[in-house]
Amino acid sequence: MSDLEYSDDALNSMGAFYRAKAIVYVEGDDDVMFWKHVLSAINVRLEIEPVGGKSQIERYAQKIISGEIDAVVARDADLTHFVGPQIKHPRILYSYGYSIENSLYTNSTIKTLSESWSKTDRVGLDTCVAWWDELLTALTPLIELDVANALAKTGVETIGDNCTRFMLSRSSHLPCPDRIGAHVSALKATIAEAPVEAAKEIINNDAEVKSRLLRGHFLATAIMKFIVKIASKYGKKISLSSESLYAAAIVHFENAVRTMRHQHYEYYKSIVSGLELTLR
């Protein structure tokens, strides 16, 4: 869908067409089920529609701010929680982390998915946590430069959406300090020292902050490598796609949110409560 295809009047009438209290616009297809589960606590009918990307969702957000359309936007936060700018509006909702993947793939989820594909209940949470801590520690300079790049508006590619080039090998689930170091050195030639220092202050070597700032697609590719490695350890040779990983993770996410056990539950509860007040 695109607002190039529909007038504002048509967009405003879509809620009635779907017999919904409001239309919730999200960035892409993967976001539909995620936000459906987040918004499930609201006891009114909402229709969720993907609009085809970040630039489109930002245009819808501006239309809500200006009063041109009566709708809701649920979007990836990107770096805005820590870097800004972020529009504060009860009908504009942001993911807890950089994107929905930062909430889809928690340590608890990684453990559950690893056990499912390995067909064992012996994958310890400590194994997942240890890997995650090692990954975050190794990636810290890259995450800092990603934030510095946003602060300085340099426009260079920092982390990207695929972890492979920063791992020990194409199939490895472990980060390679040498590869990361080489890329960091190259980036520092293009990003000024002041925004780098500012980024370090923002992150403050806080693991939770780093986990929120890590790009979602990058994260998903790393998790796929980890699950394949764990499955191999238990004698299972698996082929794992991003689609199958998402399908399994969204089921786990729904259950964790419904039972109020998800570690980001309080965050999503607060933004949903704010939205619900505007829908009465």
Image: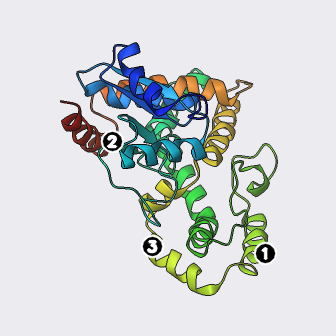
Residue 122 visible in this rendered orientation of the protein: no
The image quadrant that residue 245 belongs to is top right
| Residue identifier under label 3 | 202
Q: Earlier in the sequence, mark 3 or mark 2?
A: 2
Mark 1 belongs to which amino acid? Ala
Q: Nearer the viewer, residue 118 or 181?
A: 181
Residue 91: which numbered mark, if any?
A: 2
For residue 269, side relative to residue 135 (left or right): left
Distance in Å between CA atoms under marks 3 and 1: 22 Å
- Looking at the image, which residue is at 23% across and 42% down? 274
The image quadrant that residue 235 belongs to is top right
Q: Are the two marked residues, 1 and 2, in contact with CB atoms closer than 8 angstroms?
A: no
Mark 2 belongs to which amino acid? Arg
Q: Please state the total of marks drawn on the protein image.
A: 3
The image quadrant that residue 17 belongs to is top left
Label 3, residues with CA under 10 Å away: few <14, some 14-19, many ≥20 = some
| Residue identifier under label 1 | 186
Coordinates of residue 211 in the picture (x, y in percent)? 49, 55
Q: Nearer the viewer, residue 172 or 263?
A: 263
Mark 3 belongs to which amino acid? Ile
Determine whether the residue tagged by mark 3 lies in a helix, strand or loop.
helix
Distance in Å between CA atoms under marks 1 and 2: 41 Å
Coordinates of residue 84 in the picture (x, y in percent)? 45, 64
Q: Earlier in the sequence, mark 3 or mark 1?
A: 1
Q: Quadrant of the N terminus?
A: top right
